[in-house]
Amino acid sequence: MSDASYRDAIFSTPLDRVARFSFDERVVACFPDMIRRSVPGYGQILGMLGLIAARHLRHGARVYDLGCSLGATGLALAGTLSPAAFRYIGVDLSPAMVARARETLTEECPDHAMEVIEGDIRTLEYAPAGMIVLNFTLQFLAPEDRDAVIQRLYQALEPGGVLVLSEKVKAADEQENAWLVERYHDFKRANGYSEMEISQKRTALENVLIPDTLEGHHERLARAGFARIHTWFQFLNFASLIAFKDCR
Ligand code: GEK
């Protein structure tokens, strides 16, 4: 396959009826290109995960990567941490993502303990974990399911454990939100997406990706019991938070 086959061109032709966005084989094939060109700060966030784990993860503890897609978080952690430092468990609902993530992680990190499970993060039985990463996944759950998931993750974390939550967010102030969305579309244009691609993707994601406000995320994490919550990254309408189970 040429490089061009991996480029995200899913919304580059007019579609009579834009289908709801789904994580199928077509998306898997171009996913790394799609996420890099559509999520401001994606690379920086991944780059920091290893550094955050190096500071906060108990040696040898489990790390869950929920909605792991192709296992990018696993690759980032394995690039920074020794094989003895952690056990990675990626979880994704999409069989196509899981198959590709398993292949990649086996090939790229043969010495690390890397497991990928096909499952729903709303119902998974969680084992105790030192770190849980939710990188742009909570936003795809129905809003009414989000509290329960965050509460279960809080329960699964060991004392001293951390949750990293990265999300597309909306601003409560209408004008601020409109400005952020407009600049986000500029960001996508600058990354080579056409007007048609931007508008069709927007339609496909309607009612599929429902962003919360940053304040909403802080409140939900606090309700679940997290002792300390920081927004450590924001780039336009994309942000990442870290929540500490306790104050050690
Ligand atoms: C990355 N974290 O590269 N259970 C499990 N997986 C789910 C569920 C669910 N209920 N709902 C959606 N997913 C990745 C990027 S992508 C974000 C995450 C994006 C999965 C879905 O199949 C997809 O792989 C992932 O969540 C969201 O850092 O595409 O913008």
Image (spheres, rainbow, N blue to C red):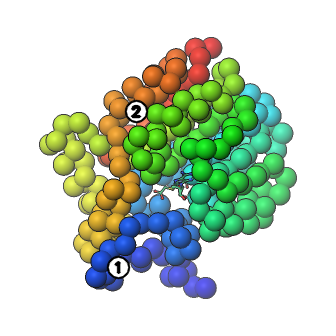
Direction from residue 57 to residue 187 in the image, left or right: left
Badge 2 local density, few (<14 within 10 Å), some, or many (20+)? many
Q: Residue at x 81, y 49 (%)?
A: 112
Q: At which x and y percent is residue 73?
A: 62, 50
Q: Residue at x 66, y 30 (%)?
A: 156
The answer to whether 25 is drawn above or below residue 138 in the figure is below
Badge 1 local density, few (<14 within 10 Å), some, or many (20+)? some
Q: Residue at x 69, y 66 (%)?
A: 99
Kindly indicate the quadrant of the structure image that contains residue 222: top left
Direction from residue 42 to residue 20 in the image, left or right: left
The amino acid on which the numbered mark 2 sits, given as a three-letter code, is His
Direction from residue 112 to residue 157 in the image, left or right: left
Q: How far apart are the two marked residues, 1 and 2, measured between alpha carbons?
A: 33 Å
Residue toward you, 195 or 21: 21
Judged from this view, the residue extending furthest toward the bottom is 1
Q: Determine whether the residue tagged by mark 2 lies in a helix, strand or loop.
A: helix
**Do the residues bearing badges 1 and 2 touch, measured as CB atoms within 8 Å?**
no
Residue toward you, 240 or 205: 205
The answer to whether 32 is drawn above or below residue 224 in the figure is below
Q: Residue at x 78, y 56 (%)?
A: 109
Write down the residue under mark 2: 217
Kindly indicate the quadrant of the structure image that contains residue 239: top left
Q: Determine whether the residue tagged by mark 1 lies in a helix, strand or loop.
A: loop
Quadrant of the snapshot with the C terminus: top right
Q: At which x and y percent is residue 15?
A: 31, 81
Judged from this view, the residue extending furthest toward the top is 248
Residue toward you, 223 or 166: 223
Q: Which mark is residue 12?
A: 1
